[in-house]
Amino acid sequence: MSTNDNAYRDGHGNGRLRGATWILVLALAEGGLAFGRAAEGWADAQWYTDAGIPFSPHVYAALNLLWVLMLLLAAYGVFKRRRWARYVCLGAMPGYALFALAWMAVFARSDYAIQRLPFTGAATFLYCAIVIWLLRGVRAGGAKNENSMDDRAAYRPPELPDTQ
């Protein structure tokens, strides 16, 4: 990486990832997780039906695919630095995490699944807090900082004094 290539730096040259980059990575990772859960639900649909599971695995797969689309939209918005991206991320990223937690809480049948709910709930709320904390610094308009999604105002040359 050259010294002028600050695309993945915070503007001060210390190599920290920007908040927008973290949000992009988290949105893509969460979208991949949702896609994996959708594929798993679709592939095991017959087994779930034969076992008498009280929900339709096709509905579960369709809901996960809907979340995949929302998370990809959020990642696209962050990547293209759109003004609406922050709001889509604020709804989609914690929304999917809470959806997955609620789905597990409602359909937890085994003792193992029930016993892991407190830890999963704490991890989910920690994840939501981290996402909200990262999004507080990711702005497309208004006040600019090193986590800004709008690089057009990142550098302003100093005003030169009048010499006349």
Image (tube, rainbow, N blue to C red):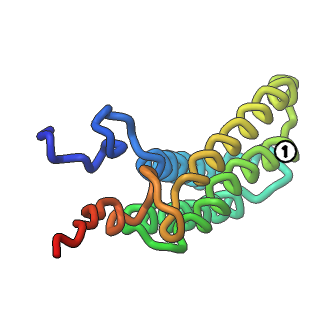
| Closer-to-camera residue (19/14) | 14
Instruction: From the top left corner, tell me how far across and down residue 49 is, in percent.
Output: 75, 52
The residue tagged with tag 1: helix, strand or loop? loop
| Image label count | 1
Residue bearing mark 1: 107
Left-right relation of 102 to 82: right
| Closer-to-camera residue (83/25) | 83
Left-right relation of 138 to 164: right
Q: In this view, which residue lies farthest toward the front?
A: 164
Please tell me which residue is depicted at 61% across the width and 67% down the height of the picture: 87
Please tell me which residue is depicted at 87% across the width and 29% down the height of the picture: 114
| Closer-to-camera residue (50/108) | 108
Instruction: From the top left corner, tell me how far across and down residue 61 is, in percent.
Output: 63, 59
Tell me the kind of residue under disc 1: Phe
Image quadrant holding the N terminus, namely top left
Please tell me which residue is depicted at 87% across the width and 46% down the height of the picture: 106
Determine if residue 125 is in view: yes
Left-right relation of 154 to 77: left
Determine if residue 49 is in view: no
Please tell me which residue is depicted at 61% across the width and 53% down the height of the picture: 136
